[in-house]
Amino acid sequence: MKIKFLYPLLLANITVFTFFSCTTHKTTANNTYPPTQTQEDGYISIPIYYGTNRNMISDNKDNLFGGKWTNEIKYGYYKASIPDGHKLGELEQAGIIQKIKGQSYDPTKYFNILENQNLTKEQFLTLLAKSMENENKDQAFIFIHGYNNSFESSALRTAQLFYDLKYKGIPIMYSWPSTGKAIGYFKDGNNIEKSSALFQTFIQDIAENNPDKKLNLIAHSMGNRLLVETINNLQKTHPNIKFENIIMAAPDVGRNDFRNNYDDQIIESAHKINLYCSKKDKALNLSKFLNFQRRLGLVDSKTYVNKPLQTIDVTNAGKCKDMLSHTCFAQSEQIINDIKALLNGDEVIREQKNSIFYIKYN
C-alpha cells in the first residue's frame, strides 16, 4: 500500500518539476520586437546581447553558464538592472550578509540579471539588427572580459560599462569560459586559446550582418589574448572587416608576442587602437613573473609604443578602488571619460611625451 501511495505523489512531483522547467526556460521564438531600455521604479532595465561558448548549467538567471569550454556558441540577451542611485565607476552588489539574509536581489540597490532569453543564431542576428534599426543606433561595442570572471560577473560589468560610458550604441558581450576562480589562471589561458575560432565566427557574423554599422571592441586583461588572436586570423581571411575602435585595457598579453605576431594585423584592422597601461598594475606584474615575459599592459622602461596604436599611461589617473589596480578602466572617472570620448568620436585631450599619452587627475 505504501508503494502504491507513492506513485501518484511521484507523478505529481514530476509534473510540477516539468512545468517549472518549461516556464523558466526562456526563448524568443515568437518575439518579433527587440528589447529596449526602460525606466522602472527605482532602477533602469538594460538589455544586453551576448554570445558564449561556456557550458550551460541551468535556466536560473543567476546561474546560467559554467566555466567549462564547449565547441558551440550559445546566443541570447539578458536584462540587467542598474539602481537609480548608481555611482560612476562602481558595480553595486550585495555583500555576504545581504546574501545570507536573502536581500541580494533588490534591483533598486544592486546590479542584477533580471531575466535571460536564449536565442538561436538567426534570432540573435535578427533582433540585434532590429535593435540598431528601431533605436536608430549606428554602432555597437563588444566587450570581452578577462581572467577569473563568471558569466554573471561579466554580464554585470558590461551593463556598468554601457551605462557609465553613456554609450550611444548597442552593448554586446562575449563570454569565453573562464573558470571564475583565482587558481584557474592557466586553465583560463588554455580555454581562451581554444575559443578563438568561435569568437571569430561571432564577430564575423555580426559585422557581415550589419555592414553599415560601426563596431568597437573592448577587451580587458586576458580577454585581450582572445582579441589579438582572433583579429590576427580574421584579417588574413576577411581583411575587408574593419572596426571603429579597439580598446585594449590592461592587456595580459606578452609584449614580445604582440610585437612579433599580432601588431601589424591589429593596426590594419581598426581606425583607432588604444592601449591602456599602468605601472601600478599588480596583477600584470604577477603575470609577468608567471609567464616569464613582460606584459603589454605594464609601464616600465620598455613600454610598448608603435604608432598609429596609441599607448595611454593611466598610472596617475583618478582613484581606482581595485587593490590590484587592474580594473581601473571601469572604475576611474578619468579613464571612463577618456574611453567615452573615443567611442563618441569626440576630441580627446591628454598630455603627450615621447609618443606616450598620459591621463592625470583633473
Image: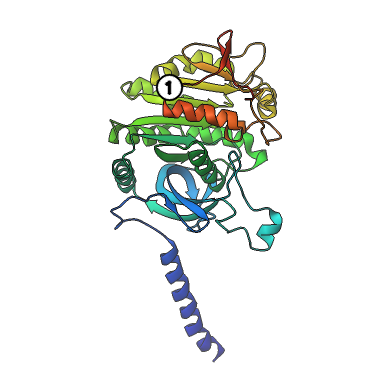
What residue is drawn where x is 56% and y is 40%?
178
| Dot 1 alpha-carbon crowd within 10 angstroms: few under 14, some 14 to 19, many 20 or more | many
What residue is drawn where x is 33% and y is 35%?
205
As shown in the figure, which amino acid type bears the numbered disc 1?
Asn
Numbered circles on residues, count: 1
Residue at far bottom of view: 1
Left or right, 188 with reference to 243: right
Residue at far front of view: 362
Q: Can residue 226 be seen?
A: no
The answer to which of 43 and 287 lies nearer the viewer is: 43
Q: Quadrant of the N terminus?
A: bottom right
> 292 above or below 143?
above
Q: Quadrant of the C terminus?
A: top right
Q: Which residue is mark 1?
A: 232
Residue at far top of view: 354
Percent from the top left, x then y, of residue 311?
Answer: 55, 17
Q: Can residue 204 be seen?
A: yes
Left or right, 89 with reference to 54: right
Percent from the top left, x then y, of residue 92?
Answer: 61, 48
> 307 above or below 216?
above
Q: Secondary structure at mark 1?
A: helix
Percent from the top left, x then y, of residue 163?
Answer: 49, 41
What residue is drawn where x is 51% and y is 45%?
155
Percent from the top left, x then y, of residue 222?
Answer: 56, 31
